[in-house]
Image (spheres, rainbow, N blue to C red):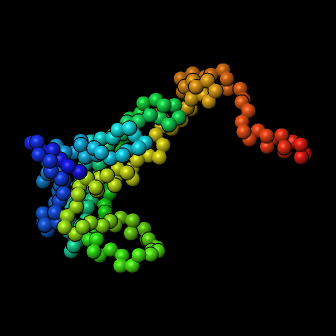
Amino acid sequence: MFLLLFGEVRRLYIRASEISREGLDVIASRGKAWIPRLLEGMNTYPFRACRMLSITLFLSLEGRDLEASGSFVAEGEGACDRCAESVTQRLEREFQTIFVPADRGPVEAGDLELRRDDLDIAFYDGAGIEVADIFWEQVALALPAKVLCREDCRGVCPHCGGDRNRTECDCAGERREGPFDVLKTLRREKE
């Protein structure tokens, strides 16, 4: 992730040496100007666009392990998967992750059984961490599998294409022949 400041491109990279014993409040040390553009370049499917509204991030060191705790509020724009209406959906998440230096990763490759506590552990290069990577991962985990304008969305009629949230269509009783209708006739013949 790059940040454009005064015509100059800079990464949002925090070196481990920048983190004091008391920890580092990233927003207090870096300001807020970069927050809206934090997700630029990220694939936010099923949304066509997603932007960060607010974040908090506190980094602390425990030995060489880097602890990141924070939260974010983002807004995604897309189309309802049932009726295709335009939808704006809010994403909110709190997180806590421990970053372990990559040189302390698993020694042997192979099958490992993960415990619940292992799911909040990630690896970093040992020198520092890219702030955008932290938030990209957290936003990816918060993205919905399906975008809906509302929970009880009735979608569009498969026959006439009318939006069933707005009006009832008259073709509800129509039935087209499908590729598996042959199986129904075989079942009747067997009986």
Classify 97 as above or below 80.
below
Classify 109 as above or below 148.
below
Classify 63 as above or below 134.
below
Q: Is residue 22 left or right of residue 137?
A: left
Residue drawn where x is 32% and y is 57% of the image: 95
- Residue 34, percent across and down? 19, 45
Is any part of residue 20 visible from this angle? yes
Outermost residue, left side: 6
- Residue 189, percent across and down? 89, 43
Outermost residue, bottom side: 107
- Quadrant location of residue 49? top left
Query: Which is nearer the eye, 136 or 116?
Result: 136
Residue drawn where x is 53% and y is 23% of the image: 166
- Residue 190, percent across and down? 89, 46
Query: Which is nearer the eye, 17 or 73?
Result: 17
Residue drawn where x is 36% and y is 46% of the image: 43
